[in-house]
Image (tube, rainbow, N blue to C red):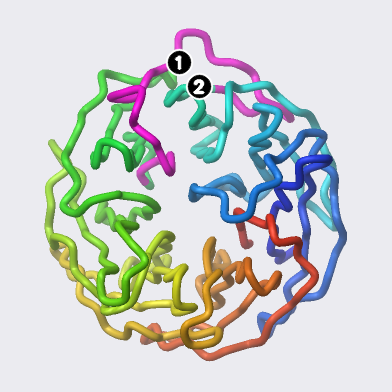
Amino acid sequence: MSAVYVQTNEQEENRVVAFQRDADGRLEPLGWFETGGHGDGRPHMTSQGSVVLTGDGRHLLVTNVGSGSVSVFRTGPGLELLGVRSTGPAPKSVAEHDGLVYVLNTGDAGLTGYRLDDGLVPLPGSARSLSSPAADPAQVGFSPDGAWLLVTERGTNAIVRFAVGADGRLGPAEVTPSSGPTPYGFAVAPDGTLVVTEAFGAQVGRAAASSYRLGDAVRPRSRSVGNGRSEICWAVITPDGRHAFTTNFADGAVSRWAIGSGGELVLEDATAGLTVEGRKGLRDEDLSGDGRFLYAIDADACEVRGWRVDEDGTLSALGAWNGLPATAAGMAAS
């Protein structure tokens, strides 16, 4: 089943809002599903990756910031809650590769590892601290081949990389200064190009993103490329690795970037998609598994927005689906 999932992040009872996607990319409500945990009840959760589909699409992982846990659902016609695992204080991002799961706990700026087996089984010896108690991390994610685990640290302006061992445990932290301040959301292309957003202010004209290549080190390719908009926070990359889309929280725009063969990042269209010019609230985004459709949360309008993605990366608006709470955050699409 093709679907889009968003968490409510409500304090009393965190839930997942599910939508079924048809062949044309349009959504129909599928239901609201309790996570068994609690959100923090605050609008605009500061992270990317709080709702994640596993690589095989069989499970959905959802962080519960208020109760320090992660919920595991089995996907299907609806969602079946399989279990809730306590992970640490204020988990805001989670990543999975071939059944290996790492949770980013922001309350203590650290990582904890698990194996996925219709629930999360703790991986002994997997816990890692980040570079500083003041790291203020935003996202955790694997490289496409699973060889590396990456974390963005806003507080230290750094990108932290860990080698992933055959047993799933992490090697020493490798810390790379970010090209621009406040590294936030990121995505990694199939060829190892890393695109990182830089959420360093809401002033018009100050939004930017950078690209890096993953190899023997995290090496900058295009440093802090501006798009003339404001407050870029979230990033996704098309399955073919040719385009990145970033959402601008402070002005309602989706920007499209071209990714060169050497990892260079070039702005193609600062307003490839638009909700309402100048309206705040556009945040978490995801592409459908086939890359044909892009969806994003418009948190201040309490709705999901959708666009069709053409072969050249052009976006065509599909519509909006309302009914989300103001605290909605995190998105995954299949």
Query: Which x, y percent locates residue 36?
Result: 82, 34
Q: Is residue 114 left or right of residue 174?
A: right
Q: CA distance from mark 1 to mark 2?
A: 4 Å
Q: Quick check: can you spot residue 246?
A: yes
- Crowding at label 1, few (<14), some or many (≥20) Cα neighbours within 10 Å? some
Query: Which x, y percent locates residue 195?
Result: 29, 58
> Which residue is label 1 attached to?
127
Q: Are marks 1 and 2 in contact (CB under 8 Å)?
A: yes
Answer with mark 1 or mark 2, whichever residue precedes in sequence. 2
- 126 in magenta: yes
Query: Which x, y percent locates residue 325?
Result: 75, 61
Secondary structure beneath label 2: strand
- State which region is magenta: 114-143
Amino acid type at image mark 2:
Thr
**In-front residue for pair 190/270:** 270
- Crowding at label 2, few (<14), some or many (≥20) Cα neighbours within 10 Å? many
- 177 in magenta: no
Q: Is residue 21 left or right of residue 203?
A: right
> Which residue is label 2 attached to?
112
Secondary structure beneath label 1: loop
**In-front residue for pair 43/35:** 43
Position of the C terminus, as image quadrant, is bottom right
In the rendered image, the vertical position of residue 154 relative to residue 232, given as above or below: above
Query: Which x, y percent locates residue 319?
Result: 67, 86
Amino acid type at image mark 1:
Ala
Q: Residue at horizontal 79%, vertical 48%?
A: 15
Q: Residue at horizontal 76%, vertical 47%?
A: 10
Q: Quadrant of residue 63?
A: top right
**In-front residue for pair 10/159:** 10
Q: Quick check: can you spot residue 165?
A: no
In the rendered image, the vertical position of residue 97 relative to residue 201, given as above or below: above
